[in-house]
Image (cartoon, grey):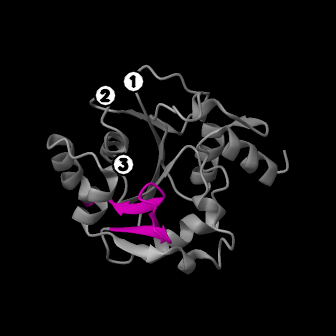
Amino acid sequence: MAVGGIVLCGGRSRRMGTPKAWLPCGSEYLLQRMARIVAGVVQPVVVAARRGQALPPLPGDVVLAYDAVENKGPLAGLAAGFEVLADRCEAAFVTSCDHPLLQPHFVKRLIELLGEYPGVVPTRGEYVYPLTAVYRLDTRAILTELLTQEDLRVRNFVDRCGANIIPASELEDVDPKLDSLRNVNDPDTYDQILRSLGE
């Protein structure tokens, strides 16, 4: 099965106070790190952004996609990424640009767990992670319908497409601490993650 990747980076980063895509992470910026990690597992990789959004330099084989309509949240970024990948892949691994501890084996396991489902989404306790997931691209029509109806909750897309919601414990053998689910929300979590990386 051909699987591509979508890295979402169009958020406003209000809690962080500065664009997450440009946060230093070792010798690269956070968006560069995410694109590199995802590209090491799936191809092609699409970075979904807002029009006019400044981005750090990315490899030439990374495809940029822009939200067709402004201020529609992650679903608009998903739709833009799906549009680019529609003729190239059957499914896409989706992540946001703020998961710098993402593990390649975590991505591979999610793809393995997709099976015949429209999508596979991890959950941990009361938290569901619809933006660290794999979806089949034939769910595009549902995305379009939700955007048309102004129903912008990503969880509603998960439910409507019939994705398989799995306990994160099924991923612990490839990512024991489930670091792949940790994201940079604010300066404190950014500092914590940098320390995890030894910086």
* Secondary structure category for the residue under label 1: loop
Q: Which mark is residue 85?
A: 3
In this rendering, the count of numbered labels is 3
Q: Residues within 10 Å of mark 1 (few under 14, many from 20)?
A: few
**Residue at (26% x, 57% y) in the render:** 156
The first of marks 2 and 3 along the sequence is 2
Q: Is residue 136 magenta?
A: yes
Name the outermost residue toward the right.
198
* Secondary structure category for the residue under label 2: loop
Q: How crowded is mark 3: few (under 14 residues within 10 Å), some or many (20 or more)?
A: many
- Viewer-nearest residue: 191 or 61: 191
**Residue at (30% x, 36% y) in the render:** 72
Q: Which mark is residue 51?
A: 1
Q: What whole-number distance in Å separates the C-alpha atoms at marks 2 and 3?
A: 21 Å
Residue mark closest to the camera, 1 vs 2 = 2
Residue 169 drawn above or below residue 199: below
Q: What whole-number distance in Å separates the C-alpha atoms at marks 1 and 3?
A: 19 Å
Q: Quadrant of the C terminus?
A: top right
Residue 46 drawn above or below residue 64: below
